[in-house]
Every structure is written in structure tokens, then in C-alpha cells.
Amino acid sequence: MSEYISEKNNITKKDFVKTFWRSFLLQANFTYAKMQGVGFCVAIQHILRKIWTNDEDYKKALQRHLAPFNMTVAPSPLIMGISIAMEEQAKEEPDYDFEAINAVKVALMGPLSGVGDAFFWGIIKLLASGLALGFAQDGNPIAPFILLLVFNVPNFLTRWYGLKIGYERGQTFLGELEQSGKLQLLTYCAGILGMVSAGCMIAMWCSITCPLVFELGGAEFVIQDTLDEIFPRLLPLLFVLFDYNLIKKGMSSGKITLLLAIIGFILGVFNLIG
């Protein structure tokens, strides 16, 4: 198990086996702030330590991979393998653009999740459930084992070979992107995609309205209806921009949460927001 995968960085097959098993903990510390980001970082943390022997470089690498990350879990090791390959490439190139690492992760999350959801949840899960139900209806005690076997064999194979292919093909794939100039374009587009995703999440998950109603000339004047006509979801956006400004000023997330709770309570008592 001590076979070297990368001698210059002392990365062995045992390190990849550890990443493979840690990939099953991708959602163990899921949060709305980082989603699977902590799990992703933990999965490759031991390899990052081997690549970046300097403490400051290692800390920066950990920060890179603590960025928000969210996708179907089974194909996620493919991105882990590519990320490891990119970190090795970054170590060799002094002027490497580190933003490209997360740009590639963001760009691959959507397409791989689409394929992963269709394959694992749309096909494999239904197939495994159907086979297991057939045995269960006959009272056969192997039914749950059939379910676990049929679902998990493709899952395990996808994880292991995805990690291997991501690492081995990552260098070639990224080299081709860089030579063609598409890596810079990908980085730029990923930034736009991230902002669009953030805007969608604000509109979907942040529900803040103004319940104030005035009577003008015998007719009701509903402030929220007027705001929706001028700028839909304006209040959620203003609150998010307010939070963002506090973060830029260095305020901790705990203090921001407490401040928002106080503001929300006061505005709620005076019936200014709903």
C-alpha cells in the first residue's frame, strides 16, 4: 500500500485510499454557509499537507478548499482528484492563479451533479429498490442486502475511479485548458455563475416583507405590492447587502446573527417587517 502516486510530493496510494473513505463524510458537517465545503477539505487535507510543507502555504490551501461546495456525493471524488492535481501544479508554477482551483470546482459541480442525480437517484436507486422489494414480498431476508449491494457497488466504483481519473487526467485536462486560454474564461464565467447563484438563493430563501398598509383617498396603499412592482425582492437584497457590509468590516458571524435577531425582533414588534 506504500506505492507512490507522486514521488516528488510523497503522495502514496494509501493517501488516496484515505481520501476515498473520507469522501463518504462529505456531508457530515453540512452547513448553510459552507454546505459540503468542510467535508471536501477534510477529504484531501492530509494530501494538502504533503504538497504544502510550509505552514503558511498549507493554511492558504485549507482556506481555498473550505469554500462553499455542493454536489451529488458519489462523483465528488472526481473533483477531489482534479483539485489535488491543480494544487501540485500550483506548487510548481510561481505565478499560478489560485482562483482557478475553485473556479474549476464551481464549473464542474453543476454538470456532475446533473449526471449524478440522474444516474444514482433516477436509475440506480429505483433499480435497487425494485429488486429488493421483489425479495421482500416473498419474505426473503436477503432483501435489504440486495438493496445495499445494488446501490453501493456503483457508488463505490464511481468514487474510487473518479478520484483516480480526476487526478491522472486532471493535469492533462488543465494543461489543455490553460494553453487554449479557456481556463481564464472558465474562471471569469464561474465568478458570474457564483453571483447568479447567490442572487437566486437570496430570492428563494430570504423571505422579508413589509406588512404596512395605508389608506389614501379611500383606497388601500400596500407598501409591499408597490415595492414588488418597482423592484421585486428588494428587502431581502438590502438585508443581504447589509450583512455583506458587516462581514467586510470584520464582524464575526455570531455577532451578525445576534444583531439580525435583535433588529428583526424590534422591527417585528412594531410590525415593520413580516
Image (tube, grey):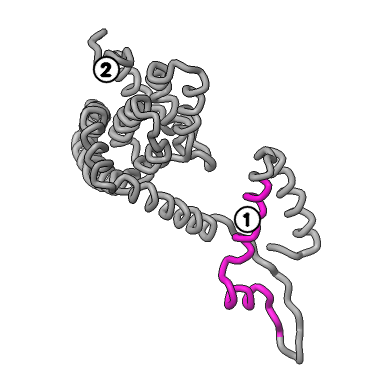
| Inter-mark Cα distance, 2 to 1 | 45 Å
Labelled disc at residue 241:
1
Residue found 43% across the figure and 33% down from its top: 27
Label 2 sits on residue: 6
Quarter holding the N terminus is top left
- Coordinates of residue 140 in the picture (x, y in percent): 21, 29
**Above or below — where is 37 with respect to 221?**
above
Magenta span has 231? yes
**Above or below — where is 90 with respect to 250?**
above
Labelled disc at residue 199:
none
- Coordinates of residue 252 in the picture (x, y in percent): 67, 38
Q: Nearer the viewer, residue 269 or 75?
A: 75
Q: Quadrant of residue 251 in the image?
A: top right
Magenta stretch in the rendered image: 220-246
Q: Nearer the viewer, mark 2 or mark 1?
A: 2
**Residue furthest out toward the front:** 95
Q: Main secondary structure of the magenta part?
A: helix
Q: Is residue 127 left or right of residue 52?
A: left
- Coordinates of residue 253 in the picture (x, y in percent): 65, 40
Q: Is residue 230 left or right of residue 74?
A: right
Say which label, 2 or 1, has the lower sequence index. Answer: 2
Magenta span has 78? no
Residue found 34% across the figure and 47% down from its top: 184
Let me know if residue 133 appears in the view: no
- Coordinates of residue 183 in the picture (x, y in percent): 31, 45
**Residue furthest out toward the top:** 2
Amino acid at circle 2: Ser
Q: Callout 1: helix, strand or loop?
A: helix
* C-beta proximity under 8 Å, tags 2 and 1: no
Q: Is residue 259 left or right of residue 172?
A: right
Quarter holding the C terminus is bottom right
